[in-house]
Image (cartoon, rainbow, N blue to C red):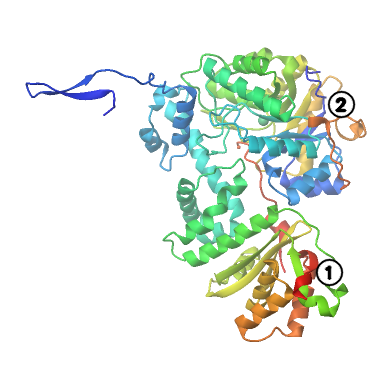
């Protein structure tokens, strides 16, 4: 168990538009869902309705791509206000985003841009994470990104930076073992060293995903199954953290729900109990509360993780 | 020339440049976090190729980025640079599928490249990226820009309607309960998820044909359309000019009486009773109105 007492939700799936109908129709036996925050802000349409309906039955975690934790623009409190409201509305168990920046001078590049790892950026990022966690009234959970460049101004490794950031800002960690593998290939370090150096008691969640190996470098495409080396890293991480909330990300060339779920459930082989945690159906009625501790009273039943924004057009528009 | 420098005239007539004092704080480190992020953003979002982007940057790529065993610094930055434009094209293609099809891949890609220079994303969501595309097309020198701007306006309206706030429509028979002598004083509250559009061409017909994988050539001639949402689905309702005018009056908050007066002025005739019955039946069944109220002062 992590130091924040965030529960092991079991093995979850990233909630994607192409699976909405399947989930609503069949209520599959999946432990939990992770929703991309930005897809559900500023919309009163079907995405929000679907998320709220799914949240009635399954635990939800909100995962963002636009918080720009390491950015040098002012923190966007309008965004955080909406995010906090959404988290309360769907009883999000926690909120995560990436160790990165997404734009400056008011612009958003919609990419998880890499940070230089040095004292200046550590102080800057830790201060922002503290402010964000205070505002959200929950410890922010920070994910290690995939990256394709290393800066000349870096003076420490990513794992040392992440550990120091977590200690200084008291945040949780979302350990993406695929990202560790991708970055280790791109930058030439041993991924096992990374996994071994992470403060295990701060790891709230793990991400699994596939990638595209171009020989000279790897791109984090989220369009495929998890490779064996990444499963081994997952096992190594679990040996340190104990059973931990685990999520399969699949964002491009997304196959049917059962295929994604089957890939995710391979994680069971690496988990101590061999079965899922407290998530999903078995947790129903457990009374466990999410961010802000409030439950909505509704009775209504980037590849980089670029948010999926649209349902298939043919499902949405009919000529009258 | 910096303020810290002064031209000093000597008796000899020699003009020299001398640093006499610097009252400003020391120059910020160009590799500090803020300038580094400014630099990287400018390179990543540069419309040219990565070499042109690097050339235009304030700092040399090799000064900022380390090589890997397999890639040079510029190749590593190039990964972010190439993915930026692909992401912008992909996002706008999702919002403007029919437009992208009508323009063709190459022309649409070129349009996006120019558009994001003028209207880069300033939102935490990509859903707002395309908000200015119709006006950008209308102001462009594209061939067929009238048709393309119309098609873009249609698809943007569909995006906005898809995302609007939800409001339950009033029961279809709500108007039937209003006494006949109060009908003219009725005022309607539209659902938020509705947009009325006038086109200079047959944009909706072309859009529908694209949906059905048929080909319909764009034709000049005004057309009118309502885009609305029902049960979280987006619908398109072609309208006659008369129906469009009447519905427009109601949606802008006028009473039925006032809408009739405006209609009569515009078309030099009163709306026929059959016409009105048909419109209200269709609009009520489509759930275009959230509520009705009788305006007392208009009696
Ligand atoms: Fe991830």
Residue at x 69%, y 67% (from the top left corner): B251
Q: Residue at x 73, y 50 (%)?
A: A44
Please name the residue that numbered disc 1 is placed on.
B172
Percent x, y of residue A138: 75, 26
Label 1 Cα crowd, 10 Å radius (few <14 / some 14-19 / many 20+)? some
Q: Which mark is residue A318?
A: none
Please identify the quarter of the rendering in which residue A96 is found.
Answer: top right
Q: Chain of mark 1?
A: B
Quarter residue B259 falls in: bottom right
Residue B241 in view: yes
Q: Picture coordinates of residue A109 (x, y %)?
A: 54, 38
- Image coordinates for residue B49, horizontal then vertical, percent: 41, 40
Which quadrant of the figure contains the N terminus of chain A?
A: top right
Measure the C-alpha gap from mark 1 to mark 2: 51 Å
Viewer-side residue, A181 vs A126: A126
Horizontally, is A293 left or right of A80 in the view? right
In the depicted structure, whether residue B155 falls above or below residue A1 = below
Answer few, some or many: residues within 10 Å of disc 2's Cα (few below 14, many 20 plus, some between 14 and 19).
Answer: some
Write down the chain letter for disc 2. Answer: A
Quadrant containing the C terminus of chain A is bottom right
Q: Which residue is mark 2?
A: A275
Viewer-closest of A43 and B146: A43
**Is B279 in front, or is A57?**
B279
Q: Nearer the viewer, residue B94 or A73?
A: A73
- Judge left or right: residue B134 versus residue B26: right
Q: Residue furthest right?
A: A285
Q: Residue at x 81, y 47 (%)?
A: A22
């Amino acid at each position: 168990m992590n130091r924040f007492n965030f529960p092991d939700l079991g093995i979850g799936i990233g909630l994607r538009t192409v699976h909405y109908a399947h989930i609503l129709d069949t209520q599959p036996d999946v432990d939990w869902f992770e929703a991309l925050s930005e897809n559900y802000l500023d919309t009163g349409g079907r995405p929000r309705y679907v998320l709220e309906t799914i949240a009635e039955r399954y635990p939800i975690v909100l995962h963002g791509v636009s918080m720009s934790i390491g950015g040098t623009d002012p923190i966007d409190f309008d965004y955080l206000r909406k995010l906090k409201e959404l988290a309360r509305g769907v009883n999000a168990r926690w909120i995560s985003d990436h160790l990165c920046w997404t734009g400056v001078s008011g612009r958003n590049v919609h990419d998880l841009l890499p940070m230089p790892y040095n004292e200046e950026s550590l102080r800057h990022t830790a201060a922002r994470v503290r402010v964000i966690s205070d505002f959200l009234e929950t410890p922010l959970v920070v994910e290690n990104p995939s990256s394709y460049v290393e800066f000349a101004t870096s003076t420490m490794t990513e794992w040392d930076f992440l550990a120091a950031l977590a200690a200084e800002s008291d945040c949780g960690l979302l350990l993406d073992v695929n990202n560790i593998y991708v970055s280790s290939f791109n930058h030439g370090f041993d991924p096992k060293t990374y996994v071994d150096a992470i403060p295990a008691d701060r790891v709230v969640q793990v991400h699994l995903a596939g990638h595209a190996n171009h020989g000279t470098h790897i791109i984090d495409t989220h369009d495929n199954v998890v490779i064996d080396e990444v499963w081994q890293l997952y096992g190594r991480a679990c040996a340190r953290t104990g059973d931990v909330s685990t999520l399969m990300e699949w964002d491009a060339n997304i196959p049917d729900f059962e295929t994604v779920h089957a890939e995710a459930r391979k994680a069971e082989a690496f988990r101590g109990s061999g079965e899922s945690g407290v998530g999903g159906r078995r947790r129903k009625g457990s009374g466990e509360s999410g961010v802000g501790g409030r439950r909505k009273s509704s009775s209504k039943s980037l590849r980089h993780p670029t948010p999926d924004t649209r349902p298939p057009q043919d499902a949405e528009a009919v000529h009258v | 020339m910096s303020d810290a420098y002064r031209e000093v005239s000597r008796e000899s007539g020699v003009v020299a440049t001398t640093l006499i004092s610097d009252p400003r704080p020391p120059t910020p480190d160009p590799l500090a976090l803020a300038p580094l992020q400014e630099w990287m953003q400018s390179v990543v979002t540069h419309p040219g190729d990565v070499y042109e982007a690097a050339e235009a940057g304030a700092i040399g790529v090799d000064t900022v980025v380390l090589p890997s065993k397999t890639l040079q610094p510029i190749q590593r930055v190039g990964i972010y640079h190439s993915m930026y434009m692909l992401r912008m094209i992909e996002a706008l293609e999702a919002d403007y599928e029919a437009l992208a099809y009508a323009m063709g891949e190459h022309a649409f890609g070129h349009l996006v490249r120019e558009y994001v220079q003028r209207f880069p994303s300033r939102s935490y969501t990509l859903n707002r990226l395309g908000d200015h595309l119709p006006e950008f097309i209308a102001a462009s020198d594209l061939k067929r820009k009238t048709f393309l701007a119309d098609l873009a306006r249609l698809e943007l309206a569909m995006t906005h309607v898809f995302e609007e706030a939800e409001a339950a429509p009033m029961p279809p028979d709500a108007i039937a309960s209003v006494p006949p002598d109060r009908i003219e004083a009725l005022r309607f509250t539209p659902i938020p998820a509705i947009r009325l559009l006038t086109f200079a061409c047959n944009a909706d017909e072309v859009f529908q044909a694209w949906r059905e994988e048929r080909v319909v050539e764009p034709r000049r001639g005004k057309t009118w359309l309502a885009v609305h949402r029902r049960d979280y689905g987006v619908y398109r309702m072609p309208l006659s000019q008369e129906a469009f005018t009447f519905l427009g009056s109601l949606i802008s908050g006028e009473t039925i009486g006032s809408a009739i007066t405006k209609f009569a002025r515009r078309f030099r005739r009163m709306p026929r009773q059959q016409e009105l019955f048909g419109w209200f039946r269709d609009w009520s069944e489509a759930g275009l109105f959230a509520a009705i109220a009788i305006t007392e002062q208009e009696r």
